Image (spheres, grey):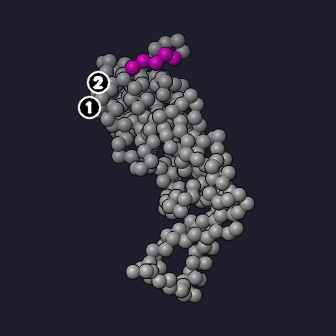
Amino acid sequence: MPLSLVPLSSSLINTLFFFSLLFPTYASSDAEGYAACEPFSCGKLTNISYPFWSKDQPGYCGHPKFKLDCHHDNATIDIVSQTFQVIDMNKKSKVLTIARLDLLADPCTNDYVNVKLDPEFFNYTSNDDYYTLLYDCGSLGYRSRSANSGGAIAFNCSKDGALRAVYFVLSTEVVNFNSLGCKNSINVSVLREAVKSDSDVGNVLASGFEVGWSGVNEDECDGCTRSSGRCGYSSSTSGFMCVSPAPTGTLSMLSSFSCFDYGGIQLLLRIQIS
């Protein structure tokens, strides 16, 4: 049965126009700009795209909080004022596995700074546990015991030419170690399974921890990709941008409010200006 075209009512036209103004987008003008935002790889991380972007791409290809630096096939990301190595990226569940770069090679450090995430974009997952590294401590009387059993994983760090005791304990158990007189500490997040399977603190920290990402216009990006665009970020509007593969010399603009319901009909709005 052939489909008939029903003229749009003036109210529907006004509604579409209203939403196009209320939720504007954002455009790259030609195929060259579209190609610049092509997904990229870094080591074992493949098909990386918005909200992430490479320092070798134009800034509009990704959100400013999700810039990746790829060096020797290792991707790093800066969150707040710290640098993390990206160990894994699950695009479907929107979860990164990351590790503090300054503790990756050696848990012995003189920089006693806790991790601080940007909660608008990154949050811990249920697979993380919270531990504390206690530095410059007195002797506990034993070498090592499972941290998961309420004990501590003990090791030594060299400081001022002498070996000083360090303990890796569950953050909820730190109060039980106050008698050691530890002078410094760092709160760290680790994967729960990593602690269960390895008693080497360096290996546990190198396994990283998980953060879920959000707050980057996921719905608008889905609408953009369904309309053959590539997601991006407009610095001029500080908002989402859909980069369209328009012919050179045209300006393509896709509405960020790409899908909505009108009288039970799902509508995908696309505005293109040439």
Left or right side of 32 for 213: left
Majority secondary structure of the magenta segment? strand
**Given the current orientation, which residue lies at the most extreme left position?**
149
- Within the magenta stretch, is there residue 156? yes
The span shown in magenta is 155-159
Q: Nearer the viewer, residue 57 or 170?
A: 57
Task: Give the residue drawn at x 41%, y 50%.
Answer: 92
Where in the figure is residue 39, as x and y percent of width and height? 55, 45
Which quadrant holds residue 128? Answer: top left
Q: Is residue 125 above or below residue 142?
A: below
Residue 251 badge = none
Task: Give the residue drawn at x 56%, y 81%.
Answer: 15
Which quadrant holds residue 82? Answer: top right
Mark 2 residue type = Arg
Q: Nearer the viewer, residue 98 or 177?
A: 98
**Could you say whether the residue bearing mark 2 is in a helix, strand or loop?**
loop
Residue 145 badge = 2
Residue 91 seen: yes
Where in the figure is residue 155, as x and y percent of width and height? 39, 20
Which residue has dot 1 on it? 149
**Could you say whether the residue bearing mark 1 is in a helix, strand or loop?**
helix
Q: Nearer the viewer, residue 119 or 131?
A: 119
Q: Is residue 46 above or below residue 196?
A: below
Could you tell me if the residues under marks 2 and 1 are in contact, i.e. CB atoms within 8 Å? yes
Mark 1 residue type = Ser
Which quadrant: the N terminus? Answer: bottom left
**Given the current orientation, which residue lies at the most extreme front position?**
1
Task: Give the residue drawn at x 48%, y 38%.
Answer: 45
